[in-house]
Image (spheres, coloured by chain):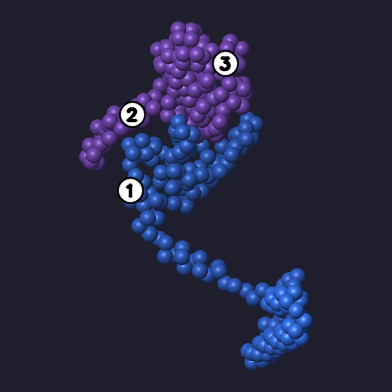
Chain colours: A purple, B blue
Amino acid sequence: MGGLGNNFCNLPSTSSEMTCGSFLSQQQRTFIQMRTVLKVVDNSGAKKVMCIQALKGKKGARLGDTIIASVKEAMPNGKVKKGKVVYGVVVRAAMQRGRCDGSEVKFDDNAVVLVDKQGQPIGTRVFGPVPHELRQKKHVKILTLAGHIA
Amino acid sequence: MINFVIGKILCEHRVKAINIVIGKIWHCRTELCRFSGSKVYPGKGIRFLRSDSQVFLFANSKCKRYFHNRLKPSKLTWTAMYRKQHKKDIAAEAVKKRHRTTKKPYSRSIVGATLEVIQKRRTEKPEVRDAAREAALREIIERIKKTKDEKKAKKAELMSKQQKTQSKGNLPKSAATKGPKLGGCGGKR
């Protein structure tokens, strides 16, 4: 949603202003690294989570990777409280991920599903679309909970 | 142009071969770009998934960029949407389509009428049909006349019965008055 907001305020009125507008709205999306704030898309109770470590990956986490995160914002009565350190699986990443057939996928925002150390999701529902890549990473449970598989 | 197309097909086959060797299943389906309407071969393009679970497939970063800058494809001359809106190249398509829709006389037997009956009916001359229609009308008129006459006769009988029983007394009269009414209702049906 942050990305969309950017586009809104940078909307040029005429095509002559296109060049400067496009420069600002075409963000170079990169990995999910320390201090990246992610949206939580399950009903575990947390709302926003900040990545403190990306497991596997020198530069950062991508779509389908697991991260360690700290809960920054949480719902008052939920399984997870603010300040807790949790594991999460990245289900939506603004950075494009290459598919095995050569095409690329990218989402609108960075979103995460909280899991426990074994990889089982803490929540019982997952909102929004979820990519195929999770199947390869053996996060089948999240796929079954998802409403829409990209 | 032809070389380009051949090159594309060869490229597809090559990738397919490699994928089979590695053991991958390839979807090999050319989809259409959501923005420009051009074909997107497998292995090309960028798929963008919005948070509301809507999928957008872009042929290249040009289309993607225009989409993200919220430009309308119907305003850009080179997109399929624009061409459709401004009705370019539709005349040729329309002419082609007209040739295909030619009706053939239906020559198969249906449950209600066998093939011979259908053919006979088809080859009937209009005079014959008119004559048949007139005959049918005449029959109906005669039938209606018959029922009307019957009704009249019944009514006359009942009236005569009523007159006979009038002298007898009031009770039978009320019964009789009820009678023709019922008879009348039955006749109307």
**How far apart are the two marked residues, 1 and 3, measured between alpha carbons?**
47 Å
Which residue is labeled 3 in the image? A122
**Pick the front one: A3 or B88:** A3
Residue type (three-letter) at the residue carrying disc 3: Ile
Chain letter for mark 2: A
Q: How many marks?
A: 3
In the rendered image, which quarter contains the N terminus of chain A?
top left
Residue type (three-letter) at the residue carrying disc 1: Leu
Q: Nearer the viewer, mark 3 or mark 2?
A: 3
Which residue is labeled 1 in the image? B76
Q: Mark 2, residues whose alpha carbon is within 10 Å: few (<14), some, or many (≥20)?
A: few
Q: Nearer the viewer, mark 1 or mark 2?
A: 2
Q: Do the residues indicated by labels 1 and 3 lie within the same chain of the protein?
A: no
Report x, y in % for residue A149: 55, 32
Helix, strand or loop under label 1: loop
Looking at the image, which residue is at 43% across and 14% down? A73
**How far apart are the two marked residues, 1 and 2, measured between alpha carbons?**
24 Å
Helix, strand or loop under label 3: loop
**Pick the front one: B21 or B164:** B164
Q: Is residue A136 above or below residue B24?
A: above
